[in-house]
Amino acid sequence: MSALKERILKDGKVFPNNVLKVDSFMNHQIDPSIIREIAREFYEIFKDAGITKIFTIEASGIAPAIATAELFDVPMLFAKKTQPSTLANQERYETDVHSYTKNVTSRVIISKQYLNADDVVLIVDDFLANGEAALGLIDLVEQAGAIVAGIGICIEKSFQDGRTKLDAKGFKVHSVCRIASLDNEKVTFLED
Ligand code: G4P
């Protein structure tokens, strides 16, 4: 069993509405040993894909994305949820990402300067639930004319439809752990 799965079983807390709280080691306080192992797994899976950039969305994707970028020795780029005052409209790509969990829609942006048609991109994020964040990031990559080589997810909630949406579009998705159910406040993985 991977260190991430073991840690989820030990320290993850299931909240109402199928939310898994992992903020003691993943997305508030962060355990670098878990992040390092996740990054190594992404590197093993995608090392021959010619990746030139790791791409994520703030905030919680940044930790696994930077650790992954370090192994690939490429830059890490994150989509911003706040509008930088120094970036003119014609200098940015933007898209809307709806969060079902938080019931908010965020306009996310990147500078055109940091993604171009030569880039081969690995998207990394902490959670895959409904797939809205991943689809927003894919939209930004496509606006830039770049290629999505794959999507690396730390925790996939396989009982929500994000994975199905990405598979249907033909993307290569690798999830370090896949959760089949959070019923009865118990975490059940899809495969062990
Ligand atoms: P999606 O991105 O796959 O569409 O999923 P959804 O709309 O449901 O999730 C929106 C936000 O909630 C995302 O964070 C996602 O990482 C987070 N999230 C989804 N399910 C869970 C869960 O079970 N536990 C935790 N802890 N987070 C979950 P975000 O809006 O991008 O915010 P941030 O936390 O990265 O700043």
Image (spheres, grey):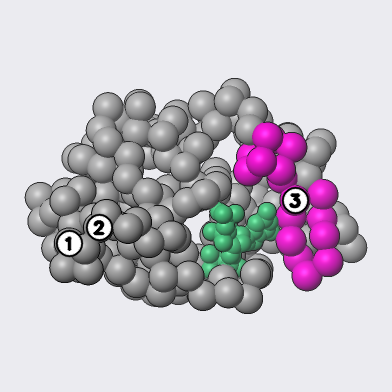
Residue type (three-letter) at the residue carrying disc 3: Lys
Q: Which residue is mark 1?
A: 91
Residue 103 in sight from this viewpoint: yes
Residue visible at 37% across and 49% down?
Answer: 78
**Which type of secondary structure does the marked residue at label 3 adopt?**
strand
Q: Are marks 2 and 3 in contact (CB under 8 Å)?
A: no
Residue visible at 87% across and 58% down?
Answer: 185
Residue visible at 78% across and 61% down?
Answer: 182
Q: Quadrant of the C terminus?
A: top right
Mark 2 to mark 3 CA distance (whole Å): 34 Å
Residue 19 is one of the magenta-drawn residues: yes
Residue 189: x %, y % from top left: 70, 52
Residue interval drawn in magenta: 13-29
Q: Are marks 3 and 1 in contact (CB under 8 Å)?
A: no
Q: Which residue is mark 2?
A: 87
Residue 7: x %, y % from top left: 73, 35
User: Between 165 and 64, which is closer to the camera in this rendering?
Assistant: 64
Question: Closer to the observer: label 2 or label 1?
Answer: 2
Mark 3 to mark 1 CA distance (whole Å): 37 Å
Residue 65: x %, y % from top left: 42, 40
Q: From the viewer's perspective, is 81 left or right of 13?
A: left
Label 1 CB sits under 8 Å from any ligand 1 atom: no
Marks 3 and 1, the one that precedes in the sequence: 3
Q: Residue furthest left?
A: 118
Dot 1: within a 10 Å radius of its alpha carbon, few (fewer than 14), some, or many (20 or more) residues?
few
The numbered dot on residue 21 is: 3
Residue type (three-letter) at the residue carrying disc 2: Leu
Label 3 CB sits under 8 Å from any ligand 1 atom: yes
Q: Quadrant of residue 173?
A: bottom left
